[in-house]
Image (cartoon, grey):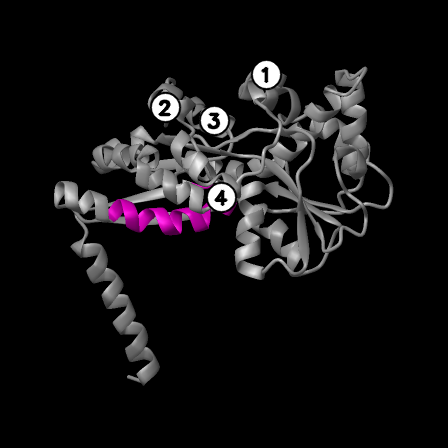
Amino acid sequence: MTPFRKSISGVMLALVASAALADASLLNVSYDVSRDFFKDYNPLFQKYWKAKTGESVELKQSHAGSSKQVRAVADGLEADVVTMNQANDIDFLVENGLVSKDWVKKFPNQASPYTSATVFIVRKGNPKGIKDWSDLAQPGKQIIIPNPKTSGNARNTYLSAWAWALKQPGGSDKTAQEFVARFLKNVPLFAPGGRDATTTFIQRKIGDVLITFESEAELIAKEFGRGDFEVVYPSLSLQSDFPVAVVETVADKRGTRRQAQAYLDYLWSKEGQEVAAQNYLRPRDADLLKKYAHFFPAVKTVTIDEVFGSPTKAFNTHFKDGGTFDQVYQSK
């Protein structure tokens, strides 16, 4: 056996041994840009759970566009928990009999442990002078976002743009739809997910503005430095929630309900909330939000319930096949 094959064999044996030593394992199926948060959160939970119960728990992650992820779960990917960025994605799992109908009541804050806002990332010096949503519908702008049909990140962008237009003097659903149609004409391509959109803008140098979660903007700064871009806060943003749920049918089948519930409960602990703040997610804990206020500029936000009635109503109106997104996009 060559040294290379010996090395690979050793790694595989180590992975098998690690899995065998764990008392339980959980798969967290999540949205595209949550990798960094869970990379920090998972070891913290493992340490907490070991100290509390004496059990070792192996934690596995899966990341992609949020709607793509829940479809994979519905098609058989055995997630013990889902941590998403759109409530309607979890409702999709309810419709498929995988999650309880009352999932929003299983945890505080309608099962969303932290929030974020939508921001614009522009080139250094903001050469196109992008300051608010109105600038993005003007000719000559290139906007980079993921596909709103599959990405919660992009749906928040679309709904934020719609909400902004709706709240302008004389705003109506008609004027909002017209504005979003002009906005979408400036999108040259749809990235598969939020992290792909970041790569397109930062590394491939395509586009004048990347629209994404506030938390992603700060993680880009950590990874790539601040030299090539600036962050612009628009005058209005839809509050981004990040709902979580136990996939009961899977957890009960695998005997992991207790660990899965604890894994999500711990997101509201002081430790979990602090990790959220350190990853630029706005914590629900008021003391920690105050402690990390320098991370979170004041921004005017509206909720999806305030503007659209509910996440389900927003999804059915805008993103179901034949909805307003399809109508305005096809008219590009």
Closest to the camera, between mark 3 and mark 2, is 2
Q: Quadrant of the N terminus?
A: bottom left
Q: Amino acid at mark 2?
A: Pro
Q: Amino acid at mark 3?
A: Phe
Closest to the camera, between mark 3 and mark 4, is 4
Task: Report the number of numbered marks.
Answer: 4
The residue at 57%/22% (across/down) is: 303
Closest to the camera, between mark 3 and mark 1, is 1
- Label 1 SS: helix
- What number is the disc on residue 280? 4
Residues at marks 3 and 2, CA–CA distance in whole angstroms: 21 Å
Rendering coords of residue 306 (x, y %):
59, 16
Q: Which residue is mark 1?
A: 306
Name the main secondary structure of what is drawn in magenta: helix
Indicate whether residue 63 is drawn in magenta. no
Q: Amino acid at mark 1?
A: Glu
Q: In the displayed structure, would residue 233 be above or below residue 243?
A: below
